Amino acid sequence: MSRRSAVLELAVLGLLKDAPMHGYELRKRLVSLLGWGRAFSYGTLYPCLKEMLRQGLIAADAETAEAGNGSALRTRTLTAGRRARIVYQLTPAGQERFVEMLGQAGPSSWEDEPFGVHFAFFAQTDAQVRMRILEGRRSRLEERLEAFRSSLQRTRARLDAYTLELQRHGLESVEREVRWLDELIDSERRRARNGGRQDLRPQHTTER
Amino acid sequence: MSRRSAVLELAVLGLLKDAPMHGYELRKRLVSLLGWGRAFSYGTLYPCLKEMLRQGLIAADAETAEAGNGSALRTRTLTAGRRARIVYQLTPAGQERFVEMLGQAGPSSWEDEPFGVHFAFFAQTDAQVRMRILEGRRSRLEERLEAFRSSLQRTRARLDAYTLELQRHGLESVEREVRWLDELIDSERRRARNGGRQDLRPQHTTER
DNA sequence: GTCCGATGTATCGGAGTGATACATCGGCCT
DNA sequence: AGGCCGATGTATCACTCCGATACATCGGAC
C-alpha cells in the first residue's frame, strides 16, 4: 500500500548508496541534488524512510559513537558520548531495487522532478537508458513548447507588453533547456562512438 | 477563515477584471498565465471561487444564451438553448480588493509563484510598486545563488561529471533570470526618467 | 553564564493534486 | 445513419506533500 513517491524513493536509495547517512544529512543532500528548493520536507522524508524500513530496502542503526562512517566531514568533534543519531544504510534488497529503478526509462523518468533525479545518477546508469531518458525529456519539452507557442499565437492580440514579456521569457527558458539537452545527447553519441572515454562539454561554448 | 491561496485569488481577480468568464475558461487562462503547468487544479479553483462568492468579491450568473458576453471567441455556434455555464464577474468589492492587492509589495510578492502573477498584472500596477517587486525578486534570486554556490563549493570534490553538469545548468538558469531582471529594472528606470513613454526591450539583443 | 543558530528527530493541520464522475457538444470514421 | 472520441463544462474526494511547530542538544559568541 501507500505508493510513496517513487522520485523520493529513488533519490534516497541513490544517496544512501554512496554513503550511510542520518535523516538531517539526507535532507540537505536532497536539497542540493534537486536544486535549491523543491526538496521534500521532513514531513515526507521521515514517513518515507519508515516505509522503506518496513519494506527492508534500508536498515537503521543508532550511531554508537564509533568511527564507522568513513567521514572526513565531522572534524573529530565527537569525543565522548554523542547523542544517538539514526544512521540509515542500504540493504542488499535496496541495492537491487536501486539498480532496477535505474534500469527503467518511461514517461515517469522525464517529467520535471523525476528527470532531475534520474540525471543525477546517470554515472551509474546504462548508456542506452541514459539516451532514452534524454530523448524522452527532449520530446516532452518539445510538446510543451508546441502548446505554449500555439497558445501564444491565439492570445497574442490581447496581451499587454508585460504579459507578453513574461510569455517570451518562459518560452525562451524552455528553448534553452532543449538546446542543453541537444548538447548532452550529442555528447552521449560522441561518447558512444569512441568507447566511452570522453568528458561532458568538451569544448565549452555555451555562453557568449 | 480558510486563507485561500492569495496567489490564486489575485490571479482570478485580475483575470475576471479583464472579462467575465466561466470556470473552465478561467482555468485555461490560469495555465497560460502561470506558464504551461503549475496552474491550480479544479479541486482548488472551484472551492476558491465558492469562497470568493461568499466574500462578495465576485458574482455568478447562469448564462442565459444571451449575447451579453462581448465575445469574438465563440464563433456564434450558440444557436438554440445552450447548456447553462456559470459566468463569474467582479463586484465593486472585488475591484477594490484587486487594486489593494496590486498595491502591496512584500516578501509574498517575489517568491516564484506570486512573482509571476504580480508581473502579469504590471501594466495595472503603480511604477513604484513594480520597482520594489522587481528588486525584491532580484535579491531573492541573489540569495538563492549565494546558497547554491557555497553548497557547490563544499561538495564539488565528490561529484561526478553528470551531477556537476546538473548543478552547473541549474546555476546558469538562475543567473539568466537575474540578468533578465536587470534588463527589466533598467528598462523601468529609463521609462521613469522620460515620463513613461517607452517599450519594454527597446533594442533587442538578448540572444545571439 | 546565557543566548542563539545549527544539528537532529518527529508530527500534524491543511493546502493542493490527480483521478474520477457525469453530461453535452461537434467532428470524424465507417 | 450510427457510433466513437476528444473538447467543453462543473464538481468532489482520497491522498500526498508542505510549512509550522515541538522538543532536545551542541558549539560558539558576547
Image (cartoon, coloured by chain):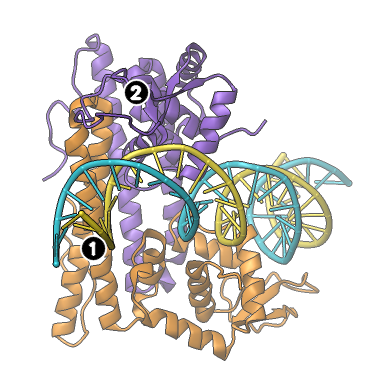
Chain colours: A orange, B purple, C cyan, D yellow
Chain at numbered mark 2: B
Residue A30: give x, y in percent of width and height.
Answer: 51, 63
Image disc number at residue B135: none
Query: What's under tag 1, amino acid-wise?
Result: Arg
**Residue at horizontal 20 percent and vertical 79 percent from the top:** A198
- Amino acid bearing label 2: Phe
Residue A36 image position (x, y, % from top left)? 46, 53
- Nearest the eye: A91 or B49: B49
Q: Position of residue A10 (x, y in %)?
A: 48, 73
Quarter residue B69 falls in: top left
Dot 1 and dot 2 within a common chain? no
Q: Position of residue B62 (x, y in %)?
A: 44, 25
Relative to A187, residue B178 above or below: above
| Residue A70 shown left or right of residue B189 in the figure | right
Residue located 54% across and 77% down the image:
A16
Q: Residue furthest top?
A: B195
Q: Pointer 1 and pointer 2: residues touching (CB < 8 Å)?
A: no
Q: Quadrant of the N terminus of chain B?
A: top right
Residue to which mark 2 is pinned: B122
Question: Where does label 1 land, which residue?
Answer: A138
- The residue lying toward the viewer, choosing from A177 and C22, is C22
- Binning the other alpha carbons within 10 Å of mark 2 as few (below 14), some (14 to 19) or many (20 upward) gives some
**Residue in the foreground of this view, choosing between C22 and A16:** C22
Q: Secondary structure at mark 2?
A: helix
Location of residue C2 by image quarter: top right
